[in-house]
Image (cartoon, rainbow, N blue to C red):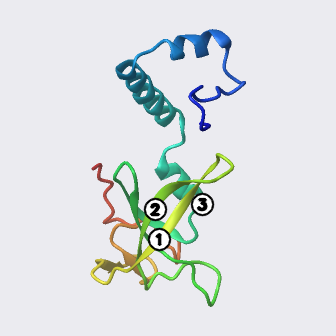
Amino acid sequence: MDDSNEGPVPPNTLSDALIQRIDSLALPELKSVLSYVEHRIESLRTSIEEEIEASAAGEVLKIADHGAYALVRKHPPDPDRSGVDTDRVSLYHVRREHRMDGTESLHWAYLGDVYNAEQIRCESCGGRIDKEASVCPHCGTENVYYTETEE
């Protein structure tokens, strides 16, 4: 928007007919259009869960989607060897972040390690695993105690 009273300059990617129709709307109608467009964009974008799974370093144990952000519990990467540090469960606050170039990325904020995470022993190899892990990261055996829950 510039400082004159002429109003905003429309993007050249929109048709003149669409710009004229938008310009003819009153404020309540414009707010409704804005709400619709925001919901439409949200329905077309990749879910935050999918983006987290694709970009996370370490093993994601649980994602709690809260709309504007997600809380993620995961085993972080093991700094001393390849794989994950199964002795730690870390909690992260993850949200989409808009960049100046118009793209989005995930912003990960470390909240701390979760020390009350219930851990069990793998039936196959005896390694410690988070109760909510579906597979043992040590040997790849399915966790027989894992039950998938929907929230």
Q: Residue at x 67, y 28 (%)?
A: 11
How far across and how far down the image is residue 119, in percent? 32, 79
* Badge count: 3
How far across and how far down the image is residue 140, in percent? 52, 69
Please report contact status of discs 1 and 3: CB closer than 8 Å, yes or no: no
Q: CA distance from mark 1 to mark 2?
A: 6 Å
Give the farthest residue toward the bottom.
80
Q: Secondary structure at mark 1?
A: strand
Return the mark for residue 23.
Answer: none
Mark 1 or 2, nearer chain start: 2
The residue labelled by disc 2 is 94
Please report contact status of discs 1 and 2: CB closer than 8 Å, yes or no: yes
Q: Residue at x 46, y 81 (%)?
A: 86
The residue labelled by disc 1 is 109
The residue labelled by disc 3 is 55
Q: CA distance from mark 1 to mark 3?
A: 14 Å
Front one among 96 and 12: 12
Inspect the image, locate mark 1, and give the three-letter code of the amino acid beneath it. Answer: Ala
